[in-house]
Every structure is written in C-alpha cells, then in structure tokens.
Amino acid sequence: MRHFTSVYDLPNLPEAIKSALELKSNPYGFQHLGKNKTMVLIFFNSSLRTRLSTQKAAMNLGMNTMVLNVNQDGWRMESELGVVMDGDKPEHLREAIPVIGRYCDIIGVRAFANLEDKQDDYTEKILNQFIDFAGVPVVSMEAATRHPLQSFADLITIEEHKTKPSPKVVLTWAPHPKALPQAVPNSFVEWMRQTNYELVVTHPKGYELDPQFMGDVNVEYDQDKAFEGADFIYAKNWSSYTDYGEILSKDRAWTVTPQKMAVTNNAKFMHCLPVRRNMIVSDEVLDSSASIVVDEAENRVYSAQTILKMILEG
Ligand code: CP
C-alpha cells in the first residue's frame, strides 16, 4: 500500500481486521519495522484522538514522530495554484509538502472540509496535493470527505462487540450547534458497506449524504423505527450535503436518549468523539454500560498501527 485515504486502499479488509486485533494483543512485536524511520503528522485542524493514537501507533512500531500544527506553529499556507501571494499566507503547499517529504518516511495529514466550496472539498484539494507532491506515502488523518482511520477503528470495535454474524448497525444524525463536515458519516457508510452487516441510516429530510457514499443503503427518516432491533447505534452530526454546509435542523428530538435506546436489541452506543453531551446523546446513555465510545477511541491506535505497518512492509 502506497497511500491510505479510504477503505479501497486496503488489499483485503478481513485480513486488515485480523492484523489489527493481532497488533492489539502484541503491540510491540514489529518495532524493527520503524527503526530509523520518521512519521510527520500535519494538522490543519484540531485533534485529540487522532494526534495521540497515530503517534502511539507509530511509536509502537519503533518510529520517530514529529507534529506540525499548521496555522499555529508553522507559516500560514496557501493552497490555491496560480495565485499572486500578496495576502497573509507566506508559504505555498507546493513547496511545503515536498520539503516535509524530505524530512520523513510517512506523512499523516488532517485537512477538514471548509464547507464553503463543495467542489474544493469533494475533490480533496489539500489531501491530493500531499499525494501529488510529498514523494513519500501519505495517510489521511481525516480529509474533507472521509475519516478512514476512524471508520477502521469503528469496524474493529463492532467486530469485538458483535454477538451475531450480521448485526444491525444504525447510523443516526443527531443535533449539534455548529456546522460539521460529512467526512465521518461518509466514511462510516463506505466501510460498513464492505461488510455483511445490516446498515440503516436515519436523519431528517435534507441531510441526505452524497450518493457516491450511500449507494443503495437503506434510509429511514423515522429515527424510532430505524432504532428497532438495532445492535449498534452510531450517532453523528453532519451538515447538509445538498444545501452544502448548512444547518437545517437543531431538533433535540433526535438526541439519543434511554427512551430511544429502549427499542433496540440492547444496542451498544458509538460515537467518534468529541461528543456534545445532551445534544448528540444524553448523559444517561453515554455513561451507561451500553456506551463503547472509549473502546472505539482505543482502537484508533490499532487501526493506525495496522496501516503504518502495511506501509512500512512496503
Ligand atoms: N475522532 C477523532 O478524530 O478525534 P479527534 O478529532 O480528537 O482527533
């Protein structure tokens, strides 16, 4: 594997899940792979889990890591090609990316959707410049349209907790005060579609995801109906794809509560974190034994470690 930006970069998903679970039981067994190798992690946006879990994954494999918070520690970066750089951005990605590539063996990059220009976001303008100009493998640590390390960790977590071969997994929209990208739900759907799980997506009208991610996945606009018999509830907010980046609803009737969970099959509750308590999910659900959000976050180490191991093995 040269770069990792989506599930389609994995040669074999069941093998990748197996590898992740093996790494979880023996995290330091491949330290020789990363000896004298360096990973640079570039953040255009904030992070807790991705930063720490990916660094931990690299260190577990014996790698050195360096972190750059663009816009805070580094020069502000221009990403448009062909512009006159007379504004407040003194450095262009066109030079910065190959320079970073000369300092390391793998680059991890986080560059969210700006939610202003659908075309810019959905063509992955920043991630693709890294792939084009880095000269070393690039790992997406959440791009404009996908969050593959998160989705891989989600899948590992479901595999660990499922009690039947084909669990019912429900992705539910939930309210949030700010406009958020569609990367996590897009990616979650994309990865779940590679399994034999029963996947249902529920959201208010107007929050339909990009058809390229949804394919023929079942959408149920009635959240209560969608939750019936579910084994896993995965909650997430996202802004509208069709009215691009807009907040169409903050309806708290969509918050995941014990009453909503009552019609499930004792479902486990999942969220990628950070989560807004009593907006996305009530305290009662998040603090209950049904919540596996911390297990999910722990598995971010092993999703990242599996990917880095595959890249190091060449
Ligand atoms: N889930 C996730 O990516 O968390 P961070 O934004 O804290 O990295």
Image: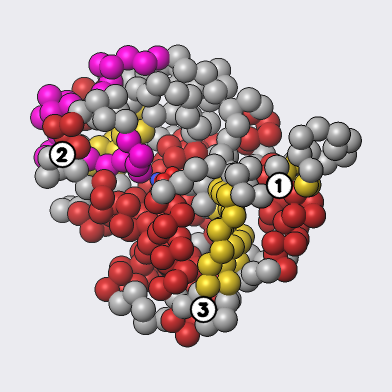
Sequence-wise, the earlier of marks 3 and 1 is 3
Taking the image as shown, residue 85 lies to the left or right of residue 276, namely right
Taking the image as shown, residue 114 lies to the left or right of residue 225, namely right
Query: Is residue 201 in view?
Result: no
Category of crowding for the residue at label 2, using alpha-carbon neighbours closer than 10 angstroms: few (below 14), some (14–19), many (at least 20): few
Tell whether label 1 touches label 3 (CB within 8 Å): no
Q: Which residues are magenta?
A: 249-275
Residue 3: x percent and y percent? 60, 61
Q: What residue is shown at x 79% (from left), y 55% (from top)?
A: 95
Disc 1 CB within 8 Å of nearest ligand 1 atom: no
In magenta segment, residue 185: no
Pointer 3: what residue? 34
Sequence-wise, the earlier of marks 2 and 3 is 3
Please identify, in this view, whether the residue under mark 3 or under mark 1 is nearer the observer: 1
Q: Secondary structure at mark 2?
A: loop
Pointer 2: what residue? 287
Tell whether label 3 touches label 2 (CB within 8 Å): no
Q: What residue is shown at x 44% (from left), y 40% (from top)?
A: 184
